[in-house]
Image (spheres, rainbow, N blue to C red):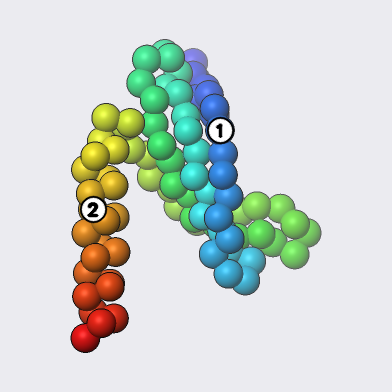
Amino acid sequence: MSLDWKTLNTKVVDAGGNNFIEVTLKQAPEGQDMFIGFSKGWTNPEGLKRYKSNVLFKIAQKEELFGAVEEMLALAKTNKDN
């Protein structure tokens, strides 16, 4: 028996050309844990979304995830300034 994940919200970020990053808020099948998902994909000539890969993070991991993003942004700024 397959249990379905519930998608609570979705935002799509244009990644240039026909590529996109989709950010979703999902709830686990049992309704207990919530996750943030990141999917990488493209739009085909017929306008349909196709997906290359995805990853889910528990909401509880948000501090670790945002901390890593902030660290990479700081490194990018440092490298740009040099």
Residue 59 vs 75, above or below: the answer is above
Residue 24's spot in the image, x, y percent? 50, 38
Question: Closest to the observer: 62 or 30?
Answer: 62
Indicate the position of residue 22 as horizontal and vertical percent values.
Answer: 53, 48
Mark 2: amino acid: Ala
Residue displayed at 65% across by 52% down: 49
> Within 10 angstroms of label 1, few (less than 14), some, or many (20 or more) residues?
few
Q: Nearer the viewer, residue 13 or 49?
A: 13
Whole-percent x, y for residue 63 in the image: 24, 39
> What is the quadrant of residue 72 in the picture?
bottom left
Mark 1 falls on what kind of element?
strand
Q: Determine crowd level at label 2: few under 14, some 14-19, many 20+ residues with C-alpha closer than 10 A.
A: few
Disc number placed over residue 68 in the picture, else none: 2
Three-letter code, disc 1: Asn
**Residue wearing tag 1:** 9
- Distance from disc 2 to disc 1, alpha carbons, whole Å, reads 23 Å
Q: Is residue 77 above or below residue 69?
A: below
Tell me the element at label 2: helix
